[in-house]
Image (spheres, rainbow, N blue to C red):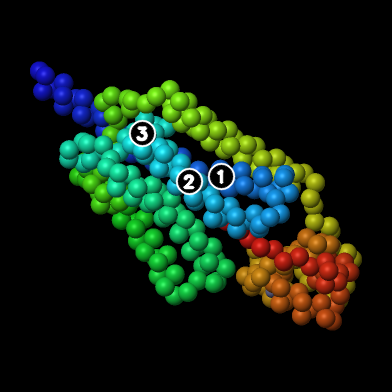
Amino acid sequence: MAEGANVRQNLQNIPSIFEISAAETLDNLIYPALSKIFDYLGLRLDFKLTDTKRFREEISPIVTWLLQYMYLRKRGSSFGESFYGLQRTHTTTGELLTRQQELISASVLTLLPYIERKLLTRAQNHEAYAWEEYLLKLFNAYKASKAIHTFMYLIKYAGSHSPIFRALRLTLRYPATPPKEDKATYIVLKLLEVLAFFLQFIQWWYSNDQRRKVGGSLVNPEPMEEQPDMLKKSNTPKGDCPICLMKIDNATACSVSGYVYCWKCIITRLKNHPTCPVTGYAITMEDLVRIYETN
Ligand SMILES: [Zn+2]
């Protein structure tokens, strides 16, 4: 009888894949939330000491690491896992994390997404070296192996849901007893969780607000009356350059009309025709704006 109760207890302790992925999603929100704060500081306090984008790219991961390490020390789980009441324990013994496992866990939680973000940005800007492209492929291979691992976990063939957990000999469980902590720690950790949600809400609100503004008032001007040297907008496939009809290279917007061309195409054309090729409005070099895409 007692044995039966014990087995049931153990089964109940195992989280489903939904809770695990929800916790992972929440962990992945920390970086954008922090970036949002630094963006906000940069915008509102006129933070001109250093380039805001660079600043947050380097500071956000450090703050994320500290936050994750604090949660791992206090609760034996990452920020997201703690939110869903999960705990990292040793696969076979069920013991809590050692100091070394805490440090590795915090570093893996922070460093892997950081490196991947950097590589992706470089690859998108066509700046990545061959070894960086190779590393990016390794990341994709890891994701595929993780998917397989998760499937194995689902069919109860693997004890943990990811290769990293397996390598660290860890798994996620619901703790039989809630972690003991003093009131101050509890309040600080709880406040951080509330703050994270508040920030996500602000971000959602802000992006909706922006979308409304863009949809409502910004309309490209209609082309002028047909002129012999004008290009037909309808001839251009969506997302392509109206001049060369190919994928836009070094996107450059014409601030008078809002149309986007390749930098090289519009500059070359501007020498002979000082007009926006689609709308026919007069433009000069000063009306061209390079568009930098960020992630
Ligand atoms: Zn072009």
Q: Are marks 1 and 2 in contact (CB under 8 Å)?
A: yes
| Residue at 84%, 57% in the rendered image | 221
The answer, for residue 295, to whether it is visible in the render is yes
Q: Give the distance between the C-alpha atoms of the residues marked 2 and 3, in whole angstroms.
A: 16 Å
Of the residues shown, which amino acid type is indicated by label 3? Arg
- Residue type highlighted by circle 1: Leu
Q: Secondary structure at mark 3?
A: helix
53 to the left or right of 88: right
What's the residue type where badge 2 is placed?
A: Thr
Identify the residue position indicated by label 1 in the image: 34
User: CB under 8 Å between callouts 2 and 3?
Assistant: no
Q: Is residue 173 left or right of residue 18?
A: left
Q: Position of residue 232 (x, y in %)?
A: 77, 69
Q: Residue tagged by mark 3?
A: 75
User: With 215 as the anchor, is 150 left or right in this view?
Assistant: left
Q: Is residue 239 above or below residue 163?
A: below
At horizontal 66% and vertical 63% (from top left) the residue drawn is: 292
- Please identify the quarter of the rendering in which residue 249 is found: bottom right
Residue name at image x 39 percent, y 51 percent = 107
Percent across and percent down for residue 12 are: 25, 27
Residue under circle 2?
64
Residue at left offset 40%, top offset 43%: 69
Q: Indicate whether 152 appears above or below 197.
A: below
Ligand 1 shows up in the quarter that is: bottom right
